[in-house]
Image: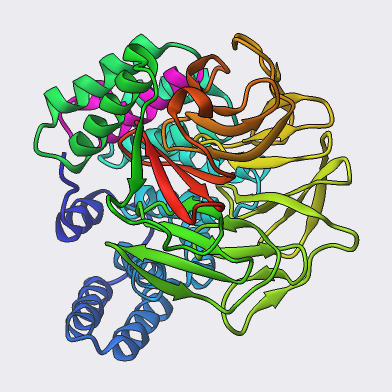
């Protein structure tokens, strides 16, 4: 349902507005000032527009046009300048002084979204959740209510309150099952169902996105996520080696030791313990400064986490690691917090964007990878356990090494995850090869290097969007793809 235009909302408000407007000339002045600011804004003379709207709020503060002017300025700061901190004082005033105005629902919704963007952990979401609830409770018939429900679903998802999240996503579907917001809700619901062990329900919801929104971007996302889950978790085709990848590239990498795929599906390769490269087609492009001892790549960026140098963000920006840290893996969480696994100390260090540091007790970490709905999967060779952690760092599943495999393994040399929660590992021991698990810890595909006909020293791996597994062979200086 489209939002009413500002002029319609203001016209309706002028009929029912109970605050004293004074003489008719006051209402006329308010509208003239608002239209003048709007004209200046359309011409991109923002300073003039803001000065005019400021005069409106000062001269005719009781007018609903004043509330709309505050909202327009707040949206400019969030959507145009990317400075939400400047929007908050305007939204605070709008909420406190104009809660009965027609601009209030959108202002409350925007304020909640700004508060979400400021959060650095799930516990910080309480105030934003309260704001979204105000939209729903105070303005139940307003067109922004479905978006408030969607934002509530995301917030409860990030807190791990799955039932509450599903309730709000279902409410969005109930308001208009064919709206674009419904497609986004279906995608979110599908991910939660899979995370909770209902793979069949997840697949049905992904198919419903394709059926109800066939031309949407969400349908494209649902399609590849559906196909990937079917191939990896339903068909479970045996892993086979496709040989060197890209095809025909032999002896070309000079000891690759680390692979990572970006969210944009670009492959990054760390080579010769010296330089990170991006693979474009069949050509390598250097990325960032030469860096020794890199143990993990973190996106966006990529940042390089080095045991010798620290956190290398770009040519000029390097951040030291906590004293005594021996990084063995790293990831960025939903809030921009950097999780660094430690190969010696029994904890995970989380560096928040605001500079705060906290630790999560965890057995010594051999490898670390993110999970798509928050949290991480951790390999601990010391305990011979694969741990699935929630977004707060608490264990939700502990999987002994080798469980449900033909023979056990002792060490995890590399760990990777994909966008649908599959986890792959390079393992060594009685079982020497590759294992893929679903998000519930069930092995879905596995093979020994011997059965694959492979010989080399494999030290890096990545999962691609098609379900293939890329391996870095540092002995033969090449990549191998399994499918």
Nearer to us in this view, 199 or 353: 199
Nearer to us in this view, 436 or 393: 436
Q: Quadrant of the N terminus?
A: top left
Residue at 39 percent of width and 76 percent of height: 81
Query: x, y (%) of residue 66?
Result: 35, 69
In screen coordinates, is 341 left or right of 232?
Answer: right
Q: Quadrant of the C terminus?
A: top left
Nearer to us in this view, 407 or 319: 407
- The magenta segment: 173-196
Nearer to us in this view, 176 or 362: 362
In screen coordinates, is 6 left or right of 349?
Answer: left
Taking 414 as reference, is 250 above or below it?
Answer: below
Does residue 286 appear in this view? yes
Taking 300 as reference, is 41 above or below it?
Answer: below
Q: Residue furthest left?
A: 215
Q: Where on the picture, by quarter, is residue 393?
A: top right
Residue at 52 percent of width and 48 percent of height: 473
Q: Main secondary structure of the magenta part?
A: helix
Query: x, y (%) of residue 329?
Result: 68, 49
């Amino acid at each position: 349902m489209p939002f009413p235009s500002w002029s319609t909302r203001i016209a309706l408000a002028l009929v029912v507005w109970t605050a004293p407007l004074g003489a008719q000339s006051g209402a006329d002045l308010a509208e003239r000032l608002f239209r003048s600011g709007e004209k200046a804004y359309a011409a991109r003379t923002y300073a003039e527009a803001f000065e005019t709207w400021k005069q409106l709020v000062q001269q005719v503060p009781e007018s609903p046009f004043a509330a709309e002017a505050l909202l327009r300025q707040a949206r400019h700061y969030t959507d145009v300048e990317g400075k939400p901190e400047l929007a908050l004082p305007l939204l605070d005033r709008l909420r406190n002084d104009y809660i009965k105005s027609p601009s209030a629902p959108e202002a409350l919704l925007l304020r909640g979204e700004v508060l979400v963007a400021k959060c650095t952990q799930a516990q910080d979401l309480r105030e934003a959740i309260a704001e979204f609830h105000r939209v729903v409770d105070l303005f139940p018939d307003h067109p922004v209510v479905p978006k408030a429900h969607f934002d509530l679903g995301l917030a409860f998802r990030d807190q791990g309150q799955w039932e509450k999240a599903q309730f709000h996503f279902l409410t969005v579907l109930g308001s208009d099952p064919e709206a674009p917001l419904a497609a986004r809700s279906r995608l979110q619901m599908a991910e939660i169902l899979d995370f909770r062990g209902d793979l069949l329900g997840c697949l049905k919801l992904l198919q419903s996105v394709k059926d109800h929104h066939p031309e949407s971007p969400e349908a494209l996302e649902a399609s590849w996520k559906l196909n990937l889950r079917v191939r990896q978790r339903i068909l479970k085709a045996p892993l086979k080696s496709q040989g060197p990848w890209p095809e025909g590239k032999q002896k070309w990498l000079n000891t690759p030791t680390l692979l990572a795929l970006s969210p944009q599906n670009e492959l990054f390769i760390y080579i010769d313990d010296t330089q990170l490269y991006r693979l474009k087609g069949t050509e390598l492009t250097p990325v960032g400064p030469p860096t020794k001892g890199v143990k993990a790549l973190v996106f966006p960026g990529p940042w390089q986490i080095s045991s010798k140098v620290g956190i290398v963000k770009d040519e000029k920006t390097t951040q030291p690691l906590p004293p005594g840290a021996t990084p063995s893996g790293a990831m960025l969480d939903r809030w921009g917090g950097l999780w660094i696994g430690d190969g010696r100390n029994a904890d995970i260090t989380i560096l928040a964007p605001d500079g705060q540091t906290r630790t999560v007790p965890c057995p010594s970490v051999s490898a670390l990878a993110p999970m798509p709905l928050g949290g991480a999967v951790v390999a601990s060779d010391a305990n011979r356990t694969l741990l699935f952690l929630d977004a707060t760092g608490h264990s939700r599943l502990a999987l002994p090494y080798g469980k449900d495999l033909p023979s056990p393994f002792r060490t995890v040399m590399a760990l990777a995850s994909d966008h649908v929660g599959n986890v792959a590992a390079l393992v060594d021991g009685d079982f020497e090869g590759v294992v893929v698990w679903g998000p519930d810890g069930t092995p879905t595909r596995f093979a020994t290097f011997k059965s694959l006909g492979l010989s080399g020293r494999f030290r890096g791996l990545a999962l691609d969007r098609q379900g293939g597994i890329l391996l870095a062979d540092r002995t033969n200086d090449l990549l191998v793809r399994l499918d």
